[in-house]
C-alpha cells in the first residue's frame, strides 16, 4: 500500500462549498451570541438540501482518493460476515430472538419452541424492506405466543408504527398504531391487547424536528382502530415528562414510570389488573413512589411484593422490596445491599435475583434468593462485559450475552437449577484474534481522579510512540462504556493500529456518583478525563499526537467536538458522529428537553455560562489548526437533529487554517442509531480510511 497518494490528498487545501452566514444574534442574560447558521435548522428547506448535497460531493471526492478506502471496505465486509444473534427472551414457553447470517441488511426475528428445536422466521425485514430504508424496531410477542406486535420506523427514526401479526400464519392483521416513541409494548395476559406510549401527531412536515410534548399511556385492543384506544394515564400538568408502562411476568400488575428527563430519577405508579386473564383496565392508578429523588426500576415480583433496583441512599445501587399493599417508605426492605462495586443491571429469573456488578468496568454475575441470601456466582468465559441479560420468574433458563474487545458477542443459556451454561448459536469469527491482547490501564485526570481505559493491540506491539491509535469514548447519561467486540476494529489492528475505549466520568462504571461527577456544572470533568487518557498514551510512548485519533457518537460526538477544540494540538484525527454540538439550542428540538437534567439549559442564568464555555459550536476559534475532522450524521436523525453537525462543520471549515480536511458525511434513509449493514460497513470503512490517511498510514 503506497503512502504517496495518502500524503497527496492530505496536503491539498480543499475548496469547500460556500456557506451563507446570517445575522442572527441571541441575547443570553446580556451576552450577545451570534448564530450565523440558524438557517440550517430548517431541515426541509431547499438551501439546506443544496448545501448538504454540495458538502457530500466534496467529501465523496476526497474519500474516493484514499488508497485504503476500498481495501478497508472489503476487509471490514469480510470481518463482518459471521452469524450474530441477540439475547433471547421467553414468552409463552417459546424462545424469541434475532439473527443475522452476517451481511443481511437487518436481522430476522425468530422463534424456537425450545432450545433444541429449529427456529422459525416470524418477521423478515429484508423481505419487507429490501432497500433497508425502514427498520424493524421493537418486537413483542403476546403471552400465549399466538400474536406478535412489531414496530417499524422509516429511516430508523424514533417515531414508530405498530403492526400485529399472527404467529402461526405470519399474516398481518389490520391493526395500525402510529406515533409511538420512547415506549415499550406490554401485552395483557389475555393476549387481547397491549399498553404503549404515544405522542400527539406532530405538525405536518415537522415530525423529525418538532419538540416533544404530551406523551401518554394507552391500551390498544387487537382488532380495533387506533381511534378507540383507551387512555390509561396522562399528566397534562407535566407535559414534557416521559410516561412508560410495563407488566409483571404474572400479568397482575401494570407499572407506570414517569421521568422528567434522561437522568435515572422517576416516579412509580401501579394499576392492579386483579385477574390477569380478565384484566380490569378500569382499575385505579395508585402511587407507589411520587418523590422523583432516585431511580425506582421494577425488576420482578412475587405476589404483591415487587423488587426494584434503586440508587436511593445508595449511589452504587441496591435491590429493595416493596409490598404494594403497604407501600409506605418505612416498610421498604433492602434485599441486596449496596456494595463498593456498582450494580449495572438486575433481573428476576426463576427463584433468583440476578445482579450484574461492574468491577473496574468488568462484569460479574451474582445470584441471590428473594430474602437476599447469596445464591452463587455465574462464571463468565473470560474477562469482559455482559451485553444482554434476560429471564422470567416462571423459567429456570437465564440468557446472557458475553463479549470483550477480542471475544465476539456470544449468547449463553444458563440452567439455574443445574448450574450449567451452554453457548447458544455461538459465532465463528473470520479472523484469528489470538495474535492480539487487551490490557486495562488507568490514567490520572486533572483533579487526580483515576480513569480506567482498555487498550487492544497486537501482542508485543513496540512502544515506539509511532502506533496509530484511536480512542473511543462516551461519558454521559449514566451509560457505562464496557469493553465489547466491534467487527470493524480488527481491520484497524491489522494495520498496526491500537484501539482504546475510555471510561470517563458521566457514565455509571462506578455508580451514580461517577455519573454525577460528569454532568451539569461538572461536565468539564468528562473532557479532562478523556484528555488524560490521551496524554497517558503519548507519555508512555504508545503513540504521538501525529498518530492519535478520537471517535464518539451522540453525547460522545459532543465529547469529540469539545476536546478537539480544547486540545487541538493533541490529536491528528477527530471523528464526531451524530453529535450534540449546539449546547445553547439543543433542548428546542425533538426530545432534547429530556437532556436538560444531564446538561442544563441556556434558559437558566447560572447554567448558560457553563454550556457556553464548552459548547462545540460556540468554541470554534478562528485561525486555528484543528485535527482532520470527518463529521458523520443522518438525514432521519430525530434524536440529535443533523443541524447540530451542519452548523458545527460549517464553523470548523471557516476557521481551519492548516491543510487538514474538515468534512461532513450525511447518510440518507438512516437515523441516530440505525443503519442497515451495508451502510454501516461503508460508513465505518470511510472513517477508518480517513483516519489512516490523516495519520499517514502506509
Image: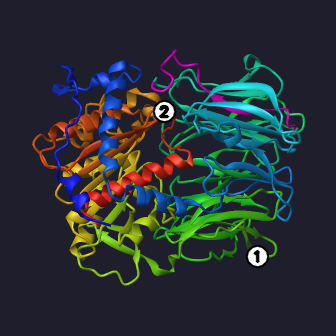
Relative vertical location of residue 97 with respect to residue 416 in this rendering, above or below: above
Question: Start and end of the magenta stretch?
Answer: 190-209
User: Per the image, is 192 magenta?
Assistant: yes
The alpha-carbon separation of the residues under discs 2 and 1 comes to 44 Å
Q: Is mark 1 on a helix, strand or loop?
A: strand
Q: Is residue 95 visible to us here?
A: yes
Which x, y percent locates residue 470?
34, 63
Residue at x 46%, y 23% (from the top left corner):
210
- Camera-side residue: 89 or 164? 164
Which residue bears the numbered disc 2?
Answer: 636
Give the image's coloring scheme: rainbow
Asked if residue 523 can be seen in this view, the reply is no
- Can you give x and y, in whole percent of width and height, for residue 476 in the image? 41, 50
Relative to residue 476, is residue 4 depicted above or below?
below
Q: In this view, does 32 lie to the left or right of 560?
A: left
Q: Are marks 2 and 1 in contact (CB under 8 Å)?
A: no
Q: What element carries label 2?
A: loop
Quarter of the rendering occupied by the N terminus? bottom left
Question: Which residue corresponds to mark 1?
Answer: 420
Residue 313 image point, x, y percent: 50, 55
The residue under the point 31% across, 51% down is: 65
Q: Quadrant of the C terminus?
A: bottom left
Amino acid at each position: 500500500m503506497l503512502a504517496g497518494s495518502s500524503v497527496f490528498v492530505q496536503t491539498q487545501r480543499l475548496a469547500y462549498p460556500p456557506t451563507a452566514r446570517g445575522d442572527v444574534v441571541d441575547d443570553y442574560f446580556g451576552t450577545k451570541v451570534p448564530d450565523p447558521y440558524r438557517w440550517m435548522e430548517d431541515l426541509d428547506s431547499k438551501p439546506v438540501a443544496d448545501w448538504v448535497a454540495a458538502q457530500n460531493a466534496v467529501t465523496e471526492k476526497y474519500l474516493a482518493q484514499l488508497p485504503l478506502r476500498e481495501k478497508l471496505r472489503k476487509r471490514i465486509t469480510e470481518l463482518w460476515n459471521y452469524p450474530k444473534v441477540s439475547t433471547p427472551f421467553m414468552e409463552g414457553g417459546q424462545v424469541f430472538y434475532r439473527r443475522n447470517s452476517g451481511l443481511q441488511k437487518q436481522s430476522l426475528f425468530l422463534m424456537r419452541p425450545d432450545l433444541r428445536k429449529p427456529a422459525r422466521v416470524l418477521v423478515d425485514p429484508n423481505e419487507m424492506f429490501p432497500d433497508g430504508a425502514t427498520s424493524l424496531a421493537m418486537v413483542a410477542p403476546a403471552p400465549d405466543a399466538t400474536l406478535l406486535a412489531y414496530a417499524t420506523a422509516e429511516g430508523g427514526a424514533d417515531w414508530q408504527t405498530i403492526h400485529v401479526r399472527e404467529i402461526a400464519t405470519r399474516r398481518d392483521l389490520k391493526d395500525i398504531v402510529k406515533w409511538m416513541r420512547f415506549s415499550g409494548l406490554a401485552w395483557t395476559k389475555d393476549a387481547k391487547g397491549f399498553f404503549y406510549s404515544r405522542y400527539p401527531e406532530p405538525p405536518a412536515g415537522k415530525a423529525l424536528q418538532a419538540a416533544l410534548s404530551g406523551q401518554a399511556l394507552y391500551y390498544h385492543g387487537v382488532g380495533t382502530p387506533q381511534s378507540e384506544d383507551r387512555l390509561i394515564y396522562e399528566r397534562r400538568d407535566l407535559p414534557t415528562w416521559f410516561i412508560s408502562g410495563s407488566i409483571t411476568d404474572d400479568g397482575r400488575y401494570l407499572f407506570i414510570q414517569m421521568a422528567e428527563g434522561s437522568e435515572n430519577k422517576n416516579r412509580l405508579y401501579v394499576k392492579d389488573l386483579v385477574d390477569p386473564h380478565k384484566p380490569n383496565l378500569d382499575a385505579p392508578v395508585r402511587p407507589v413512589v411520587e418523590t422523583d429523588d432516585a431511580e425506582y426500576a421494577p425488576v420482578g415480583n412475587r405476589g404483591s411484593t415487587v423488587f426494584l433496583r434503586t440508587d436511593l441512599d445508595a449511589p452504587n445501587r441496591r435491590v429493595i422490596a416493596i409490598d404494594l399493599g403497604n407501600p409506605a417508605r418505612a416498610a421498604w426492605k433492602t434485599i441486596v445491599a449496596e456494595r463498593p462495586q456498582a450494580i449495572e443491571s438486575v433481573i428476576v429469573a426463576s427463584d433468583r435475583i440476578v445482579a450484574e456488578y461492574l468491577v473496574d468496568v468488568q462484569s460479574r454475575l451474582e445470584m441471590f434468593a428473594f430474602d437476599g441470601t447469596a445464591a452463587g456466582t455465574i462464571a463468565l468465559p473470560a474477562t469482559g462485559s455482559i451485553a444482554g441479560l434476560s429471564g422470567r420468574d416462571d423459567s429456570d433458563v437465564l440468557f446472557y450475552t458475553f463479549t470483550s474487545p477480542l471475544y465476539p458477542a456470544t449468547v449463553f443459556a444458563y440452567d439455574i437449577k443445574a448450574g450449567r451454561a451452554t453457548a447458544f448459536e455461538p459465532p465463528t469469527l473470520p479472523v484469528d484474534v489470538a495474535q492480539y491482547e487487551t490490557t486495562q490501564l488507568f490514567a490520572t485526570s486533572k483533579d487526580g481522579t483515576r480513569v480506567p481505559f482498555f487498550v487492544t493491540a497486537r501482542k508485543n506491539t513496540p512502544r515506539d510512540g509511532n502506533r496509530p491509535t484511536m480512542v473511543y469514548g462516551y461519558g454521559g447519561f449514566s451509560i457505562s462504556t464496557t469493553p465489547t467486540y466491534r467487527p470493524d476494529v480488527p481491520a484497524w489492528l491489522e494495520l498496526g493500529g491500537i484501539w482504546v475505549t475510555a471510561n470517563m466520568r458521566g457514565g455509571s462504571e462506578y455508580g451514580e456518583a461517577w455519573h454525577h461527577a460528569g454532568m451539569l456544572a461538572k461536565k468539564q470533568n468528562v473532557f479532562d478525563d478523556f484528555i488524560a487518557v490521551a496524554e497517558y498514551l503519548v507519555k508512555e510512548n504508545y503513540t504521538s499526537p501525529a498518530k492519535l485519533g478520537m471517535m464518539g457518537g451522540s453525547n460522545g460526538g459532543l465529547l469529540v467536538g469539545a476536546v478537539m477544540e480544547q486540545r487541538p494540538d493533541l490529536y491528528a484525527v477527530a471523528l464526531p458522529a451524530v453529535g450534540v454540538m449546539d449546547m445553547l439550542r439543543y433542548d428546542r428540538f425533538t426530545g432534547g428537553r429530556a437532556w436538560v437534567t444531564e446538561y442544563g439549559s441556556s434558559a437558566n442564568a447560572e447554567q448558560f455560562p457553563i454550556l457556553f464555555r464548552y459548547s462545540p459550536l460556540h468554541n470554534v476559534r478562528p485561525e486555528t489548526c484543528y485535527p482532520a475532522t470527518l463529521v458523520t450524521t443522518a438525514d432521519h436523525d430525530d434524536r440529535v437533529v443533523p443541524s447540530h453537525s451542519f452548523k458545527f462543520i460549517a464553523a470548523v471549515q471557516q476557521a481551519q487554517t492548516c491543510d487538514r480536511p474538515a468534512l461532513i458525511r450525511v447518510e440518507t434513509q438512516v437515523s441516530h442509531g440505525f443503519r442497515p449493514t451495508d451502510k454501516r460497513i461503508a460508513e465505518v470503512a470511510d472513517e477508518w480510511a480517513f483516519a489512516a490517511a490523516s495519520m499517514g498510514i502506509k
